[in-house]
Amino acid sequence: MASILGFGGYAPERVMTNDDWAALIDTSDEWITTRTGIKKRHFASDDEATVDLAGKASLVALEDAGLTSEDIDEIIVATDTPEAYTPDTASFLQHYLGCREVPAYDLGGSGCAGFVQALDVARARLLLEPKRILVVGVELISRLMSWEDRSFCVLFGDAAGAVVVARDGGAAELVHVVAGTDGSQTDILTLKTGGTRHPFNAESLASGAFNHLDMDGKRVFREAVHRMSQAVVDVTGHIGKGVADVDLVIPHQANKRIIDAVQQKMGVDDSRVFVNVHDYGNTGSATVPFALWEALGKGRISEGDLVVLTAFGAGFHWAAAALQF
Ligand SMILES: CC(C)(COP(=O)(O)OP(=O)(O)OC[C@H]1O[C@@H](n2cnc3c(N)ncnc32)[C@H](O)[C@@H]1OP(=O)(O)O)[C@@H](O)C(=O)NCCC(=O)NCCS
C-alpha cells in the first residue's frame, strides 16, 4: 500500500574536521574519534537555510522518481531546526519547489526519529487516497547550536534527505513501521528555552540558555541502544520475519559506539549495517534518509533486499521501518 518512488540527499559543501574544532575549542581529534567515531561533518554556508537543504535533497528525490514538483500532492518535513519559528518549513519548501497548493506540514520537535515517524504518517495518508507524498528529513543544527559547548557541538552536522512515497510503483515497498514515545524522558535531551514554559527573554540571552541543549549523554546512549534494537525486532516480527532475515540495517547515525552496541545486541555483523557517521556526524532527522540514499548510491542495496531503518530521538521517541526492495 506504500512504495518509495525516489530517493535524494544533500550535504552542504563546507567541511568541518575534528582538527578544525580543536582549533576553536578545548577538544581533540582523538577524543571525538574514540567517543563518537566522527571524523568530519558538513556545515551549511552563510547563505543557506533549512529550506535550501530540504529543497536540494527533494530535487534529487524527484529526479530519481522521474517526477517534477508539479506531481507532488502532499509534503511532510521532519525537522528540529526549522527555517523560521512560524510558519513551518514545509510551507517554505512548497514555494521553493514550485509545487501546487497542496497540503504541507512539519513534524517538528520529534528529534532524530522524525523522518521515520513521518514515513509512518505518509503510509497512513496513503490509505485514505492515492497521492505522491514528498517526505523530508532536514537539519541545519550548526546555525542554532552553541559553538562553545564542547560536549555537544562536535557531535552534529547539517544535511537533508528526501523520498517520494506513493501507493505503488517504486523500487521499495514500505511494508511496516513501528513507532513509540516515552514522554517521561523529555529531560534527557531537551532545548527548553523558546517554548511557553521558558520563553526567550533577556535573561536567557545573557546566560546562553537560548541555545543550550540539556543532554544526559549516558542515559541517551542507553535508551538509544535499547530502543533502536528493540524497534528492529518489533518491525521485523510484525511482518513475520526476524533480524536474521534483514539484509541491511540503516540506523540513526548519532554515534559509532551506539551503532556498535545496537549491532552487538542484535547479533548483526558489519556487512549488514550501514554507517556514515564518520563523514557527516549526527544530522538529526536527516541521517536516516540521507544514509538510505547514500547506501543505494554505493550499491549496498540490491533488488530483493529487506532493509530496516531504525531511529531514536529527543522525546524520547523511537521508530523503525521495514522496506522490501
Ligand atoms: C556525549 C558522549 C559522546 C560522551 O561520551 P562519554 O564516553 O559518555 O564521555 P565521558 O562521560 O566518559 O567523558 C566526559 C568527559 O569528557 C569531557 N568532554 C566532553 N566533550 C568533550 C570534547 N568535545 N572534547 C574533549 N573532552 C570532552 C567532559 O568535560 C568530561 O570531562 P570530565 O570527566 O573531566 O568531567 C556520549 O555520552 C554519547 O554519545 N551519548 C549520546 C549522545 C547522543 O547521541 N546525542 C544525540 C542524540 S540524537
Image (cartoon, grey):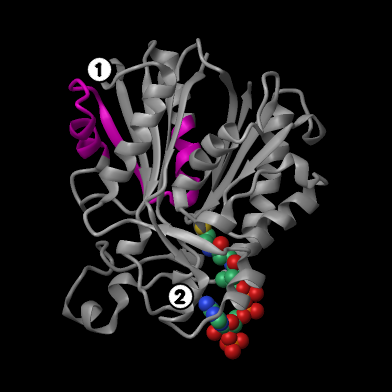
Q: Is residue 218 above or below residue 2?
A: below
Q: Is residue 34 magenta?
A: no
Question: Which quadrant does ligand 1 occupy?
Answer: bottom right
x and y percentages locating residue 71 in the rendered image: 30, 15
Segment tinted magenta in the rendering: 90-119
Q: Is residue 201 above or below residue 91?
A: below
The residue labelled by disc 2 is 21
Q: Where, by quadrant of the figure, is residue 203 drawn?
A: bottom left
x and y percentages locating residue 127 in the rendered image: 45, 15
**Left or right: 280, with 30 as reference point:** left
Type of amino acid under label 2 = Trp
Residue situated in front as seen by the camera: 196 or 77? 77
Q: Earlier along the polypeptide chain: callout 1 or callout 2?
A: 2
Q: Where, by quadrant of the figure, is residue 106 drawn?
A: top left
Type of amino acid under label 1 = Glu
The residue at the point 26 percent across, 30 percent down is 104
x and y percentages locating residue 131 in the rendered image: 36, 14
**Left or right: 221, with 284 as reference point:** right
State which mark lies toward you, 1 or 2.
2
Marks 1 and 2 sit apart, C-alpha to C-alpha, by 42 Å
For the C terminus, give its image quadrant: top right
**Left or right: 263, with 181 as reference point:** right
